[in-house]
């Protein structure tokens, strides 16, 4: 019944639908049915399933910020793995999420070469990014999955949340990139990309990191 309903539902960009009393087995079936190559994102929290279709503005923001993070990691010569909107889930916690972008940095070597991740044995990503144009962020799910750092970008502002004693605390510094004023820099370069272009902005950002 759930799959039949999902096939019939059209979710306009920027909108979301909620399903209640979704079992873990139903979630697994739904994810398989939806497939990996899709625009819609899901969040699952103890029986509540949310499916959301992002806006173009959302996609632009996540791509540019993701590119800035990659440039930063490259300039700092840090090995990393970017897994985009990979589905992270833990059956024991009955929770799952698909970030807009995520990175393994400190734990990169622990998942290098793996084709599938199991959060009951594998570490969560070191950094997750949510561009909250459509108000979809679920920090409680990231907390439960023990993601050390969550970036939320909304209305032109970047909020860095770091995990302390099992809960997120807003911070002016990143765990992964200490001593860099990224709360100011990331929104500035994202805005610059809208007039200067993506390539010129990334080059300017690299110079800023080098200095």
Image (cartoon, grey):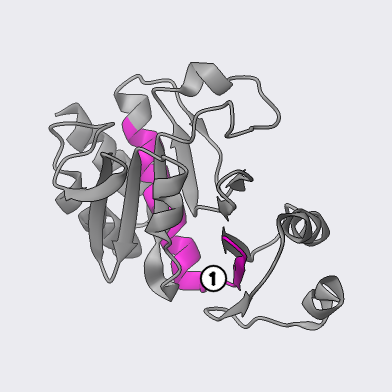
Name the foreground residue: 12 vs 175.
175
Q: Is residue 184 left or right of residue 121?
A: left
Q: Quarter of the image for the N terminus: give it.
A: bottom right
Local crowd size for mark 1, using a 10 Å CA cut-off: few (<14), some (14–19), many (≥20): many
Residue 121 shows in the view: yes
Rendered position, 8 above or below 193: below
**In front of the other: 204 or 120:** 120
**Is 66 colored magenta in this rendering?**
yes
Q: Residue 87's spot in the image, x, y percent?
A: 62, 48
Q: Position of residue 151 (x, y in %)?
A: 32, 51
Residue 114 is a magenta residue: no
- Where, by quadrant of the figure, is residue 92 drawn? top right
Q: Name the magenta segment's main secondary structure.
A: helix
- Which element type, helix, strand or loop, lies under badge 1? loop
Q: Position of residue 94 (x, y in %)?
A: 59, 52
Task: Point out the stretch of residues depicted in magenta.
Answer: 46-72
Q: Is residue 117 left or right of residue 204?
A: right
Q: Residue at 26%, 39% (x, y): give it.
A: 165
Q: 145 and 116: which one is in front?
A: 145
Q: Position of residue 175 (x, y in %)?
A: 25, 33
Q: Identify the residue under disc 1.
A: 54
The quarter of the picture where residue 187 lies is: bottom left
């Amino acid at each position: 019944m759930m799959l039949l309903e999902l096939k019939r539902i059209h979710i306009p960009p920027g909108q979301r639908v909620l399903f209640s009393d979704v079992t873990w087995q139903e979630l697994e079936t739904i994810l398989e049915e939806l497939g990996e190559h899709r625009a819609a994102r899901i969040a699952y929290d103890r029986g509540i399933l949310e499916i959301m279709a992002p806006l173009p503005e959302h996609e632009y923001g996540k791509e540019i910020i993701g590119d800035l993070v990659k440039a930063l990691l490259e300039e700092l010569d840090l090995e990393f793995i970017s897994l985009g909107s990979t589905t992270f889930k833990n059956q024991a916690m009955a929770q799952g999420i698909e970030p807009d972008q995520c990175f393994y940095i400190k734990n990169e070597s622990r998942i290098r070469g793996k084709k599938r991740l199991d959060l009951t044995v594998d570490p969560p990503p070191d950094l997750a990014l949510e561009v909250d144009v459509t108000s979809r962020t679920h920090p409680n799910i990231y907390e439960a999955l023990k993601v050390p750092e969550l970036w939320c970008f909304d209305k032109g502002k970047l909020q860095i949340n770091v995990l302390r004693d099992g809960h997120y605390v807003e911070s002016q510094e990143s765990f992964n990139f200490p001593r860099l004023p990224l709360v100011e820099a990331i929104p500035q370069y994202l805005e610059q990309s809208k007039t200067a272009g993506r390539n010129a902005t990334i080059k300017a950002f690299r110079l800023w990191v080098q200095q």
